[in-house]
Image (cartoon, grey):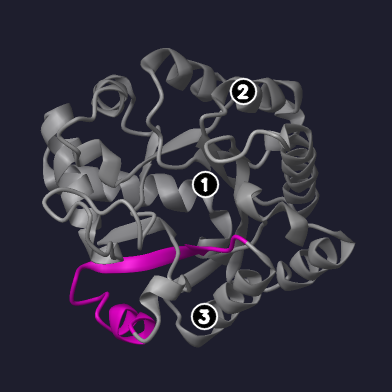
Amino acid sequence: MLIDTHAHLTDEKFLGLTDDIIKDLENQKVEKVFCMATDKKSIEDVFDLSQKYPNIYAMLGIHPEDLDDWDDKTKNRIIELSQNPKVIGIGEIGLDYHYRNDNKEKQKHVFVEQLKLAHMLKLPVSIHNRDSIGDLLEILKANKHLLEFGGVIHCFSESPEIFREIKKLGLKIGFGGTLTFKNSVTAPLVCKECDMTDFLIETDCPYLAPEPFRGKLNEPKYTTYIAQKIGLIKGVSYDTVVDQAKKNALELFKKVNL
């Protein structure tokens, strides 16, 4: 069965739908969902959801678009909640210069602070990158010692050359709906090149639904379309992709196995 390694089930777009979606996961052949926090409110919401459902796991962090939510109180709250076995990583953290690039230094500072936090807690990270790969790579290379417990660049759509740099850092990449898009160029090239141990499968729901649902509400059940696309590109069976992706996820997010 599939694991959706990056979802936003507490997003307002799922208002009134979340419980039904989770209750239907087994019927949709989705075994587990790793749910991301992005701000102070979602840290609490994601944690509560992980306590309510055995197949939902929490990752806690502050997204680069929600920088004002990062302070000592938030940091200490993440430390407190991370003692719970259902909190398996720090995320979603990273850099995003798409809408704003006038706060780059603050973004970089908060990103590094959360990398330090993840290392202190001995947890992997889920990293966001949008129009920021140069600075992101520079930070990751300069702080490689903070990546001891691994991580993933989620929704990876950079070039094969960038992928090779990411791999040297010991990080995995996440393939999502963008891999299936008809105008996707770099992600299929990376998918073809990467080893079977290099990737995770994710939806980033409710956003970035795969073909043929592009533009519609994304859900964890659509991981099956991403797995099918990976198999098609790599010339391996669907079951092979699903089994290996699950193995990769459990290898990285070790608290899931405890």
Residue drawn at the location 24% of the way across and 50% of the way down: 242
In which quarter of the view is residue 89 placed? Answer: bottom right
Amino acid type indicated by mark 2: Leu
Amino acid type indicated by mark 3: Leu
Which residue position is annotated with label 1? 252
Q: Nearer the viewer, residue 93 or 215?
A: 215
Q: Which residues are the magenta region?
A: 17-38
- Magenta segment: does it hold 22? yes
In the displayed structure, 240 sits above or below 137; it is below
Residue drawn at the location 33% of the way across and 24% of the way down: 194
Image coords of residue 158 (percent x, y):
41, 25
- Give the quadrant of the N terminus: bottom left
Q: Is residue 37 left or right of residue 8?
A: right
- Magenta segment: does it hold 77? no
Q: Do labels 2 and 1 touch, CB within 8 Å?
A: no
In which quarter of the view is residue 235 placed? Answer: top left
